[in-house]
Amino acid sequence: MLKRTLASSGAAVFAVVAAIASAHAEDAYVIGVTGALTGPSSSTNGPPIEGLRLYVDRLNASGGINSKKIQLSILDDQAEPSKAAANAKRLLTQDNVSLLILSSLSSTYAPVVAESKRANVPLMFMGAVCPKEVYPPAEALQFCTTAYAGGYDSRATLAFVKATAKEPVKLGLVAMAIPLSRGEIDYAEQHAKTMAMTTVDKEVIPPPTPDYTPFATKLKDANVTWVFSWAPWVTEVKTFEALRRLGWQDNYIAWSHIEAESELARLKDNKLYVIGANSLFQDRLPVHAEIADAVKKANVRYPAEQMTEGWIGGLVLEAALKKVGWPADAGKMRTALESVSVDTKGLRGGPLQWSKDNHFRTRQYYRVYRWDDAKSAIVQAQDWTPYDVQ
Amino acid sequence: MQLIVNIIVLAAMYALLACGYVLIYRVSRVMNMAHGELSMLGAYLLFATATLFAHHPVSAIAVAVLMSILAGVLVYVMLMRRMTGEMVLAAILTTIAIGILLRGLIVLIWSAAQQHPLQSLGFTNPSLEVFGGARISTCAALIVLMNVLVYGSLFAFLRFGRWGVRMRAAGQNPLLAAQRGINLHAIYALAWALSTLTGSIAGMLIALDSGLDQSMVVIGLKAFAPALVGGLDSLLGALVGALIVASAEVLAIHYVDPLLSDVVPFLVLIAMLTVRPWGLFGTREELDRV
């Protein structure tokens, strides 16, 4: 009797909780997020999700969009394809999300894209490298807010190297042994030829490497005068530090990942450049102060300068939801995303605009930063340089 | 010359990590698959104490070392002790579970962001010129020196120390050792403490040299290959195995293809398992028990 009473009480409580949750979800925009909150790539993919959450919390605190709250359903995939697929399936079939957001390693893309296509729900890459399907002519369901841009990044970097170098460049290239990084560095090698630069060494470094010195030794022995690295930050910075420990004193340029700003300040090296599409907090824009304030209030574990990618994701989500109206569905969301135009408030060099054929952005801007010993601060080495995305 | 220095440094990293695998296996026949995570935990403990004792680096290091020893003892007392008398496989699976638990806890406590305990301790890591123009970082040199110290101490302890002799006895014949009045649980707890200590020292020094993140787990796992190549129950084997694997890895990076660096330790391991499955200095009957 007691057992039966307990069981029925439990069932009743469960039903009430489920009903409350369901009622809450029915009265809110439900957005699904799968990302590497833990696991080896979580230092890169975790902060953008945190930044998005911060932005959405602020929106909800100020009344939401169209008087409706936004409910983020966030699941951890640990950068494992099978977990990402299971997350996507759950978000699409159980939570009925109108938009799926992905912040994880590229190895998780294929299963999540497949689930998104099956459910006909748009998928937005945020804080994870943009796949080629978002470039013109874009796949109907895929969108990307992330700063990285395969091909354009190498073109902008090599153009900067060419403009800055005072003598013929002996180029060294560094990639991590993952498909996207290798692909970009292979592209850079080809593009360098068209710019009359000699690539004297290319190192493709496996991810779990205990000591980067053997790779750096090869670069140093090849007498490189510039090194360009487009890889996860850990590979970029550890190769640089190993080169410096070997006494190499030339120039190193790396993609400006979310860790770049604090790392430039830590390393204090005049010849370490970072090139990226996001402004750094040292620019002290009002939006930077806004983000820093939100981070402080929410007691976030990551520093404010790592929130930019997630904040931009939030700006895009806000703009899209305003267009979608109420109630939201995947079809309306897709149509809204196709014409999004967002003022990034200086976080990027210009607005983030999408069209029916271009789900990356119509124009990509790059800025280069480095440490300046004389000023004891991070300075701009080159201001925003635009590239039209064809 | 730089190549030789690179080999010595990598071998030192592997050897310091590998001796932890050997210590536990030699005494209790358990392959500790959480050794990488325990090494990483030691490094994170140093990061935590470095932040806590901001202007007292010596205190920070001492407390981190003590906490690492305690962590090893706690793992044995709270979990592995219950595996006594169970199948070896059950004990190995328990270590895998401990590893998963530690990985999750570390992310929850310290986040996944890369950390720099060297900076928190207020130390620098200048490059030193050694012979023939070759260079080595101060922390890498410390890893090499620490190997000499750790292996020297362990050899002396196991050969001449009362508890060291007891550890050897427990490893060779636990039943007879127990009948002679040796407290097996104390011996096993000591083995876990020493193993975690050496692993943590390796983790701390690698973190001081090149930063701290989740990839340290994989480095710990890679050090399993040198331990097997040398023979799982031989400390000398761990040293020689580390040297062989590190040489193969560095030479493959330099002369063949950098991508091979990830594969080479395991190629050497497969070659060794084919020719001499019990490892260079391992004993044959030990392997039969595995």
Image: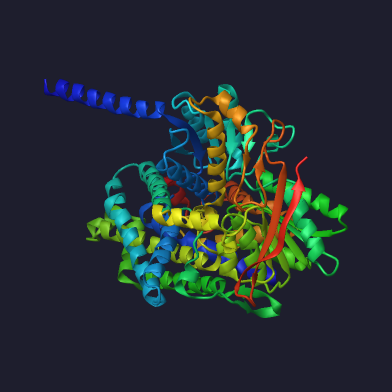
- Is A282 drawn above or below residue A341 in the view shown? below
Relative horizontal placement of residue A135, taking residue A313 as reference (left or right): right
Relative horizontal placement of residue B247, taking residue A39 as reference (left or right): right
Count of number-bearing discs: 0
* Position in image of residue A8 (x %, y %): 20, 21
Here the colouring is rainbow
Relative horizontal placement of residue A7, taking residue A285 as reference (left or right): left
Q: In the rendered image, which quarter contains the N terminus of chain B?
A: bottom right
- Is B62 drawn above or below residue A289 in the view shown? below
Could you say which is closer to the camera, residue A15 or residue A359? A359
Could you say which is closer to the camera, residue A215 or residue A16? A16
* Position in image of residue B39 (x %, y %): 44, 59
Q: Residue A170: in sight, yes or no?
A: no
Could you say which is closer to the camera, residue A332 or residue A106? A332
Could you say which is closer to the camera, residue B144 or residue A274? A274
* Position in image of residue B223 (x %, y %): 52, 56
* Position in image of residue B127 (x %, y %): 61, 76
Image point (40%, 45%), residue name: B92
Q: Residue A200: in sight, yes or no?
A: yes
Relative horizontal placement of residue A320, taking residue A189 as reference (left or right): left
- Is A92 drawn above or below residue A104 in the view shown? above
- Is A145 drawn above or below residue A196 in the view shown? above
User: Looking at this rendering, what residue extends furthest in the left direction?
Assistant: A1
Identify the image quadrant of residue A197.
Answer: bottom right
